Image: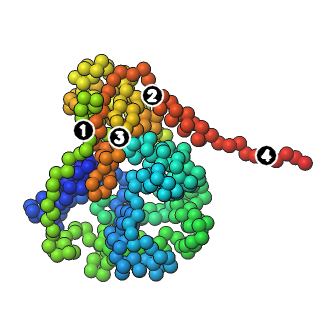
Amino acid sequence: YYGLGVTEHSQGSTTVIAIANLAMATGNIGRPGVGVNPLRGQNNVQGACDMGSFPHELPGYRHISGDVVREQFEAMWNVKLNDEPGLRIPNMFDAAMEGTFMGLYVQGEDILQSDPNTKHVVAALSSMECVIVHDLFLNETANYAHVFFPGSTFLEKNGTFTNAERRIQRVRKVMAPKNGLEDWEVTLGFAKALGYEMHYNHPSEIMDEIALLTPTFQGVSYAKLEEIGSVQWPCNEKQPLGTPIMHIDGFVRGKGKFMLTEYVPTDERTGPRFPLLLTTGRILSQYNVGAQTRRTANVVWHEEDRLEMHPHDAEQRGVRDGDWCRLVSRAGETTLRALLTERVAPGVVYTTFHHPTTQANVITTEFSDWATNCPEYKVTAVQISPSNGPSEWQKEYDEQARQSRRIAMPVVEAAE
């Protein structure tokens, strides 16, 4: 298994290729307890990837440029599909700043708080003509939304989740959505408003279409999931009950292909101005940007983002445990309290990104993986100095967020 400590680097893809090479060279494939598996960050990241949530792929990891595959989807959807890959998220922001990317539909993600170089994200969102946020909560991205669609929780909708072992499992609605609609129904309504009507009456019909168009899901249906509980893809005529272990008799392509790798150093460098390295991550009691967990009693354990630093680095800068300190990089600056600990090495500092008042990603830069554009959250050159409290930018951001979330009073018509 590998996680974000591998992928959130400029050479993350190179490292994953090297891990795959090592697994093949040592024979650690095609049997229980071996293989290469990414630890996904959320419960249905695998399912989203399976369904083509990439700018260059259709469901089943098939490239958009493939004429035969693309024509199958065109016939089913009765639309013409572009054979050129779309934009990744960082490219969308750059295009928005250039004036060529004008609208965005964000579903279940808080890009403003989670993406790097927050000031650049703010500028990009502000440049767009239409930003639609579809979420459970008025998250930080919603501060810049023109339209907000309320989402539904996993308890309020039917569907499936697919976990990191390719296991497809049913999600069953146990209560009516507070907003009146399940997420798929909101998307249907949105499509209809744009002039493209979809004729689904239940998520099971969507799964039937997936099975029709995606070879690895050919044998998947709600009826089968009800019967056997869950199934691991590929599930088709050859493997009607799914595939618990991949590559037992070899790869689909035949023999595995070793790929030569070269070390790709990061462009981020420490120096006299920024002598420390910042790495960011999560903590057990908070979940990602904290939109859910900050609304629970979990805040008792993690009330604020803290900057963890080695006592030697703190002493050199006149910072004591609990002091406000200014954290600055070439991208921006923020202020947060220090937490002195020997669990980080000298020369390295660490913080989380769970609280919007900190906006830790105002520090991180636009550097990313050479193949995937995954941001380089693990390496940012920074400097630290004592501070008296939140920065001016943080104060301005908090005020902007407060103003954005004001609820307009209902208009009352005067009695005749």
Report if the CB atoms under discs 1 and 3 are less than 8 Å apart: no
Q: Which tag is nearer the camera, tag 1 or tag 3?
A: 1
State the residue at coordinates (50%, 79%). 78
State the residue at coordinates (48%, 57%). 100
Provide the secondary structure element on which disc 2 rests: loop
Please give the label number shown on residue 364: 3
Looking at numbered disc 2 in the image, what kind of residue is underneath it? Ser
Relative to 276, is 22 on the left or the right? left
Please give the label number shown on residue 391: 2
Report if the CB atoms under discs 3 and 4 are less than 8 Å apart: no
Looking at numbered disc 4 in the image, what kind of residue is underneath it? Val
Q: Position of residue 251 (x, y in %)?
A: 19, 72
**Mark 4 nearby-residue class (10 Å; few <14, some 14–19, many ≥20):** few
Residue position marked by numbered label 1 in the rendering: 269
Provide the secondary structure element on which disc 1 rests: loop
Residue lying furthest left: 26
State the residue at coordinates (28%, 48%). 8
Looking at numbered disc 3 in the image, what kind of residue is underneath it? Thr
* Distance between the alpha carbons at the discs numbered 1 and 3: 13 Å
Q: Which tag is nearer the camera, tag 1 or tag 4?
A: 1
Report if the CB atoms under discs 1 and 4 are less than 8 Å apart: no
Is tag 1's residue or tag 3's residue first in the polypeptide sequence? Answer: 1
Q: Against 23, is 78 above or below?
A: below
